[in-house]
Image (tube, rainbow, N blue to C red):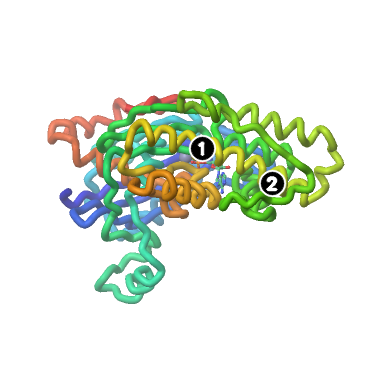
Amino acid sequence: MSNTLILSIETSCDETAIAILCSSKKGLRVLTNQVSSQVKLHAKWGGVVPNLAAREHLKNFPKLLKMALEEAQITPSQLDAISVTSGPGLIPALLVGVNYAKTLSYLWEKPLIGIHHIEGHIYANFIKQLSNDELRLAIENPKITNRKSKIENRKSPKINFPILCLVVSGGHTQLILMKDHLQYEIIGQTVDDAVGEAFDKVARILNIGYPGGPAVARCATQVKSRKLKVESNSKYEIKFPRPMLHKKNFNFSFSGLKTAVLYETKKNPDLLKNKKYIAEVCHEFQQACIDVLIAKTLKAAELYNPKTILLAGGVSANTELREQLQIAIQQSLPNTKYQIPNTNLTGDNAAMIAAATSFRWEKMSEVQKKKALDGWKTIQPAANLKMK
Ligand code: KG4
Ligand code: ZN
């Protein structure tokens, strides 16, 4: 891999993000990873409002671009390529990022590449975070690096194929088989809600805050962990279904689980004021999701024999999921490697888009790279972009 400098943009939902990444023989080095979150703005609506998100992206972008170029200490002329999330996502939000990217590509005369959001989440795993000691050394010793970036990287993790990816986000729940870089075979997916969406809806039912996923996870920690199969002595005897657990395919369903939570809370609305009850509901709901995700992943792994099982997407921030999947793999598939993204790269960011771009760039012929100079004429956002 020769030295390549990539500037990437991500605006598919409620995070405005710009990153600059240098890929070389030594691996992927993130020079800057700017993320401006709109959580506070959307909190009062209980979910992302597409037009508000777009307006914020429009406002944030110029500031973020200035900060990114300054932190990375590069000038636009040094860039090899620009990339942007072209889908899937909210169209008003995607349009802002895509149009900024097109403008920069045209003005700076740089190739433009459209990237699938989920491809980005998967490739976040190829960026390794420095340990605290390494980070301190890097900051103290400018010979090692003069960058302030928190996710500098000299050695990217070696991830062996085939990879079985468990993708868990607000819009997706998929099992994807990768026999090689940039090759995706979807072997299972949700037939209704995504798991992150179910977390968000359950948080709304329980009125425990926004964004829902982290709120549910936080409440669930108040109940003794069952990760080592120690049953908690629940006072309320709450039991939710494990949807599609025994189905032969690798699909998921989380909509019924969310409805089960709704029915449970309707039985006795007064209990919604009781923190212990809320914690029990969150814990049992989270565990139901985790049980199904793990069971289906292991079942798929038995059939496809991956060398690596990789976790990706916003819900991969969930500590219980990260840990329980690790234990399950160690117990059932001790020869399979387990790969999870750094916790600061689980949510939407542009470093992951840049990481995916670096692998695409490496595979492109000179003719394709030249054609990408016209990317600003052709790339369009697509709400339901398919993975290729
Ligand atoms: O990947 P992401 O940032 O955006 C999409 O591509 O959708 O994922 C966002 C989703 C949200 O549904 C959010 O509630 C969920 O990830 N999430 C979590 C946690 N942190 C974020 N779900 C469960 N536990 C968490 N700790
Ligand atoms: Zn995402």
- In-front residue for pair 127/81: 127
Could you tell me residue 8's position as x and y percent? 35, 44
Q: Quadrant for residue 236, please give it.
A: top right
Could you tell me residue 38's position as x and y percent? 56, 46
Q: Is residue 75 above or below residue 362?
A: below
Q: Which residue corresponds to the image point at 30% horizontal and 25% vertical from the top-left?
A: 378
Say whether residue 237 is left or right of residue 182: right
- In-front residue for pair 15/159: 159
Say whether residue 134 is left or right of residue 37: left
Q: Quadrant for residue 376, please give it.
A: top left
Q: In which quarter of the image is the C terminus?
A: top left
The picture quadrant for ligand 1 comes to: top right
Residue 85 appears in view: no
Determine whether label 1 and label 2 are within 8 Å by CB: no
Q: Which residue corresponds to the image point at 23% horizontal and 33% vertical from the top-left?
A: 372
Residue under numbered circle 2: 209
Say whether residue 243 is left or right of residue 62: right
The secondary structure type at the circle numbered 1 is: helix
Q: Which residue corresponds to the image point at 77% horizontal and 51% vertical from the top-left?
A: 276
| Amino acid type of the residue that numbered disc 1 sits on in the rendered structure | Leu
Badge number at residue 255: none
Q: Nearer the viewer, mark 1 or mark 2?
A: 1
The secondary structure type at the circle numbered 2 is: loop
Q: Which residue corresponds to the image point at 34% horizontal and 46% vertical from the top-left?
A: 336
First-in-chain label (1 vs 2):
2
Could you tell me residue 237's position as x and y percent? 76, 42
The mark tally for this picture is 2
Q: Quadrant for residue 238, please give it.
A: top right
Residue under numbered circle 1: 293
| Amino acid type of the residue that numbered disc 2 sits on in the rendered structure | Gly
